Image (cartoon, coloured by chain):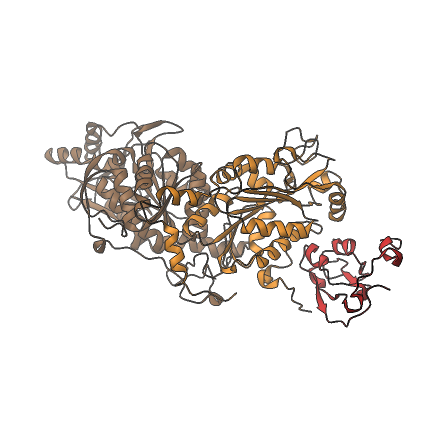
Chain colours: A red, B orange, C brown
Amino acid sequence: MKEASIAEKPKYWRKPLDVDKLKMPRGKLHVIKERCKGCSFCVEYCPRDVLELSTEFNSKGYHFPLAAREEACVNCKLCEMLCPEFAIFSEEVETEVEKVAK
Amino acid sequence: MNERHPMDKLLREDRIPHIWCSGCGLGTCLTAFITAIQESGIPLQKMCVVSGIGCTGRVAGYLNIDSFHTTHGRAIPFAAGLHLANPSLKVIVFSGDGDLIAIGGNHFIHSARRNLDITVVCVNNFNYGMTGGQGGPTTPIGCKSTTTPYGNFEFPFSIPYLAAASGASYVARWTALDTRRLTKSLGEALRKKGFSVVEIISPCPTLFGRLNRQGTGLDILRSYQKDTVIQHGADPSKVPIEKDGKIIVGKFVDIERPTFLDLVKERLGDKFEIPWEKFEREEAAVPSADE
Amino acid sequence: MQSDSGVLTGEHFLSGNEACAEGALAAGCRFFAGYPITPSTEVAEHLAERLPEVGGIFIQMEDEIASMNAILGAAWGGMKTMTATSGPGFSLMMENLGLGIMTETPCVLVNVQRGGPSTGLPTLVGQGDMMQARWGSHGPYEIIALSPSSPQEFFDLTIKAFNLSEQWRIPVLVMADEVVGHMTEKVTIPEPGAIQLTPRRTPRVPPEKYLPYEPDADLVPQMAIAGHGYRMHITGLTHDRKGYPVINEEAQGELVERLVQKIRKNRHKILEFQEEMCEDADVIVCSYGISARTSLLPIETAREEGIKVGLLKLVVVWPFPDERIDQLAGCVKGFVVPEINFGQISLEVERCAHGKAKVIQVPHAGGGIHNPDKVLEAIRRAAA
């Protein structure tokens, strides 16, 4: 997502009536660095652009992902599903009800 | 740091990291499969996976269930024997395009014909990866491989067409990128009674991808995103995969058809006591091990 | 007849192939996967009819390769399994016989030999697969092969084959031939209680402690079957005690050495041969299968001529009774080895005689049994 997508423009959102009670799921990322083989599937397909390849590398010489914008993670688990190495997974984090749309 | 991935209890942890290349789609296929078997509700103790030879065949070595790594092309008849000896087992064949469709082609079509109640997951990377990138029965026309250095000039099989024509009850094709739909389809295939086939198009960046200048595993996934068209219920005879063409995916066949054991029961049920009833009664006596 | 036990107790007039099928049922075989091939087809046909009666499964597979694999799979599913074939099918089964040996899967493979090579003489006798039985699959290994000479023996040896396969966790071959398979003779089938059966060696430890290829003292590991929570990994690749593939010299040394020694060190519990009139013999006719039987007339005739000749009939052909041949070679002038091929077991006799006695082959291209005159002539030459 390079530019602000149409979805972010509040004018185009229908506001759900219970918007005050909605909870945005949040995730905490875990990366098993030594398993990573630097394929970048997770970085590419994270819908919230949470991940970036690190500058560090693991003992096999691969750059593994880091959660650069962890606060944006919504625990969709797409990284966990796409990762071919069983090297990344997210855990649901308890959050308070917060405003989902401004 | 010794973090445990949620799927680690279904993996033979001492074998991870696995041997597959960076960017290979097999790990993704395995992840989808593990999710599907966990969500299927079928007891893990009853699950058996049988694989053949090849990169995909190595799947059996990583799954922490009863797993059998058999000879090239012969996973399906082995699985047939295993299934018939104990029909309460859920037998899954997990192997590659060359293993299942070339050397194993005869077994594939006959077991589909018989509608044996097993699930076949065929990962198609269009070549023989393990042995260095030779062409296979699914290599599209014009594609390079080490045995088709001038571009392949043989028509390939369309796996869904072959499966459907042979009598499979469930036929679907997905790419490794489409993990959510793939996982759901694998779940359906597992629960489906009859011969179910799920073909997974997966990247092979080290061999097929490199020989055909497809780029990295990620580039290949991006091309799947661009070229995949979902057409549930498409005519299986009309979903060929061509070089630079569209990849039609979806659930193509989902029919009800009596299985081999159904027919045995039907024809012999009145005359003889059929073995699996014995197994079903015996189930209660076998103490189940914890998962 | 008790349909549960599958044992057709009583006195019957059966062909060898039918006796083999009944032997399998009496041994507890409940799964047969095969492909029709003359002259073994009657085994399959008889079992197609009988297996449902005893609650077993019969399936005709698409080829012999599928048949061999299906019986391996069914063995891991917990059943006693068998297939039957002849020369061309035997050749096809070789790769997966190796898989059975490597994974230590108990099962029985019956070869009703016919004239070869290639398509040869489908309906006529041969004994040309004996060396193939020993060495047909690739790689270093040991095998067990039995050879019946009559329908009664075909019944008995099929049961023995199942017992040996369970005891030593190895596919066992029954090398019959077309004459024994097709001849009809009296076969006495005992009460189920009178038949000794070797049960499968199931694990004595719980799943957490179980290692699929940890051998017991006799070099044979305990065998778990699928679906009982043992979560084993079974592979044809060279593997360690956990069953995981390990591709190095050390693992190969440990595993393959054990597979070979499993049979070699225990050979004295496996060997079986029958000796008749060998105590004072100057010549010993060493044979197996139908050729052992057709040697009886020349032996009788030679005895009448004053030649002291005896018969050494091999019941278990592989492992070969090296020591006994060596011993006898020190006491006799010569061995005569009639077989329906151009010299296969005779090579073994020569090897084991260590030059101490003559070994005279009586070859036969196939298609019929030996002319007794030829065998008699060979006995005379050996006695000279």
- For the residue pair B169 and C10, the one nearer the viewer reads as B169
Instruction: Pick out the residue farthest to the front.
Output: A17
Residue located at (76% from left, 60% from top)? A64
**Where residue A31 sits: x, y (%)?**
72, 64
* Count of labels in the image: 0
Residue B128 in the figure: left or right of residue C338: right
**Where residue C109 sits: x, y (%)?**
36, 43
| Quadrant placement of the C terminus of chain C | top left
Residue C84 in the figure: left or right of residue B59: left
- For the residue pair B227 and A57, the one nearer the viewer reads as B227
Residue B174 in the figure: left or right of residue B80: right
Residue located at (70% from left, 56% from top)? A83
**Where residue B97 sits: x, y (%)?**
60, 41
- For the residue pair C112 and C319, the one nearer the viewer reads as C112
Residue C27 visible in this rendered orientation of the protein: yes
Residue C294 sits in quarter: top left
Residue C353 sits in quarter: top left
Residue C140 visible in this rendered orientation of the protein: no
**Where residue C100 sits: x, y (%)?**
43, 48
Residue located at (76% from left, 39% from top)? B213
Residue B180 in the figure: left or right of residue A18: left
